[in-house]
Image: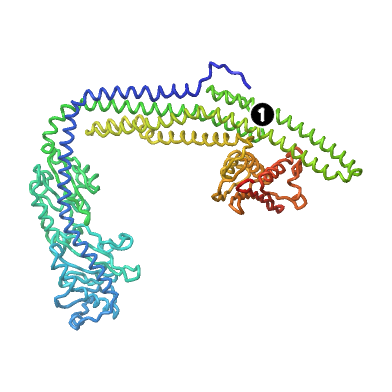
Amino acid sequence: MSAHQPSARRSIFHVIANGYIKSALIPVVLIELALIAAYLVTNTLIRDENIQMMNTSARANLQETARLESYAIDNQLEAVTRQTALYAERTRQALASDYQPSRVELNRYANSEGGAWYTTEDTGGSALLYSAITSVGPEERAKAWRLEQLDPLMKEIVRTSDLVTQVYFNSHDSLNRIYPYFDVLDQYPVDIDIPSYNFYYLADAQHNPNREVVWTDVYVDPAGQGWLASAIAPVYRQGDDFLEGVVGLDIQVNSIIEHVLQLELAWDSYALLLDGSGTIMAMPGRAETDWGLAELTEHSYEEAIHSDIFKPDAFNIFKREDTRGLADRVSATSGVAELTLNGASKLASWSEIPNTGWRLLVVADEEQLYADANALKDRFDQVGIAMIAGLILFYLLFMFYLYRKSLRLSGEISRPMQQLEGQISQIADGDYDLPVTDFQIREVQHISDGLQAMSAELAAAHNKLTEINQDLEQRVRERTDELEQANHLLRDEKSEQERLITELREMQAQLVQSEKLASLGQLSAGVAHEINNPLAFVSSNIDCLRDYTDSLMRLQSGTEALLDNDAQRKQLASMKAQEQFDVIAEELPDLIADSAEGARRIKVIVDNLLDFSHISNTEWKTADINQCLETTLVICRNELKYKAEVTKELATLEPIVCIPSQINQVILTLLINAAQAIEQHGRIEIRTRSEQGGVSLRICDNGSGISAQDLPRIFDPFFTTKEVGQGTGLGLSVAYGIVNAHGGRIEVDSTPGEGSCFTVWLPETQT
């Protein structure tokens, strides 16, 4: 035992109290003072709340305006989406059907000079062109004629929809069937390759794996019908994954544009319609000054044929310098953004039209929208910034301080506990030569000093027991020799001599084992009680630390929510980055949770030490064999974990009447023997069952096993197969006696080289 200066020691209570006074109590007092100061200025800041409410309400109203108007447009487009899905399904069914076309249908097709197969006259149905790149045979003609079944549906879609201008089906082998009828040779090249067009591959498996209806971008129709967009859907062969073709419904965008141009909105705001690529499709006259544009509503055929999609850069918000900030945010479904147009500050709100991916953009003059709120807000910005910045800085510094203190406190407690656990494991392994320790916590040092003293006493007791055992063995041998000599003269007394020898050996075995277990129980109880006291302080204060931390994080979040100015937010973000606030906020809960888990694990070890410390108690009581097994496994964990993988199959058992400490002794003996039978690393299997008015415990290992000649002698006192000095031969003998005293039985099955199985059966009651 080492000598130390008592003045250098500190109690666990002192460590925890001193740490938390500095890291928790004082900051809490400071927080209270800050809250009082905040309360004093609340009346002034209420006006800022009113300003925020006014601004929020105005932005919300602007956002709601965009949402409602886009919802109205989307309702119209949703109907087209459903019609497209219906047309795709009917097309799939038609292509898979057996159909005989009418004579009129059969007679209105011809081959063109360029090799295309097409409809030659309008009979009230649709037009068809089979490209010259496909060799049209009987199978292709039959497919084209089966599509005649869809003509009534195509007519009805165009007739009942205000938006749809034409309906078509395009196949993988460049068949095009379209309604209303027109001269296909005049509009299409005879060798058109339909799958090469974007509207076709947008519907293939790569671009549309879910096989849904999708919308194309807006484009100018080369046939002179103005702005168009198409809803398209794939048509797969029935029962197959082959893409047969694509159906589409073309809509005229002019009617939607007219609706947008005629909107009358609050705050003298106006609406614009953007397509999926960010191009302005419609803007009212009063927006032309802001954007420096003139509304494009009509395009010539010449313009259309010389541009795949007619979208001048000036009309695209992604290509304009003054709308770059808006373009970065408009990819969201909805929102509000600030921008500058023609030197004036504007507020733009947008909402997505889900079916097409278009966006309705509502633009209002920011000065007019915030006129009343801005006048009041400017007078109080400076006060708000100073106060909020001070609070945020304080909370950041406090959280960083608390984080550093919690790490230090955890280390001061956990490291000594780990060293004590190592010393206990060393004693449990039979190594009583403990290293000298020097802990700064007084109670922990007392425990360590106690372990040193106990270790020395156990070493002395072990040596003494060894001497006693050797003396007893010598006396037994001498007595045995005397009895054997007398046996030749007194054969009638042979039975009595054998009984005396057996009793003597059993008494010796019980004496040695009892001394060992009593010493171990005394050591376990002392260590457990010494650890329990500081552990209670640690667990309680970790819970308090978790509650304080949660409160402070909620207070910080609430304060941050008060910020309504970009300058304030940027200043706060800079301060948070400088103090590593995100790292602290993310790691602090884990650190507290790790400390709590460490305390819980120490508690489990202490409870099991206390449980096992009652090993010398010989009182009969009811006990659960499974619980006895779990307790003993904890005690011998160090002996087992390096030698074997332990598997358990425990049944639900009724309590039995027994002496629990003795049953623990039996289980401990069987587990230690199983581990010692394994040379390197093996497996130990444990199983409990209810059977024959009692319970059974079976412990099997895959160790070296027991030879046939040694198997009948394993329960004899002092019989051991271990080398001299490695075992006394008392463990199984004592276990056998305990089981017999309980009215039970113990059996063994063993195969050399494969392992052994010990089965213990105990009755539920004692007679």
Q: Residues within 10 Å of mark 1 (few under 14, many from 20)?
A: few
Q: Quadrant of residue 238?
A: bottom left
| Residue at 66%, 42% in the rendered image | 669
| Residue at 18%, 72% in the rendered image | 184
Q: How is the image coloured?
A: rainbow
Q: Position of residue 628 (x, y in %)?
A: 59, 42
User: Circle 1 sits in a helix, a strand or a loop, which is it?
Assistant: loop
Q: Quadrant of residue 208?
A: bottom left
Q: Count all numbered tags in the image, as a single digit.
A: 1
Q: Is residue 320 above or below residue 248?
A: above
Residue nearest the viewer, comparing 571 with 533:
533
Q: Is residue 64 above or below residue 207?
A: above
| Residue furthest bottom in the image | 103
Q: Is residue 175 above or below residue 324?
A: below
Q: Position of residue 277 (x, y in %)?
A: 22, 52
Give the labeled residue for mark 1: 433
Q: Quadrant of residue 89?
A: bottom left
Q: Position of residue 561 (x, y in %)?
A: 26, 34
Residue nearest the viewer, comparing 715 with 251:
715
Q: Which image quadrant: the N terminus?
A: top right
Residue nearest the viewer, comparing 127 with 63:
63
Say if residue 217 shows up in the picture: yes
Amino acid beneath label 1: Asp
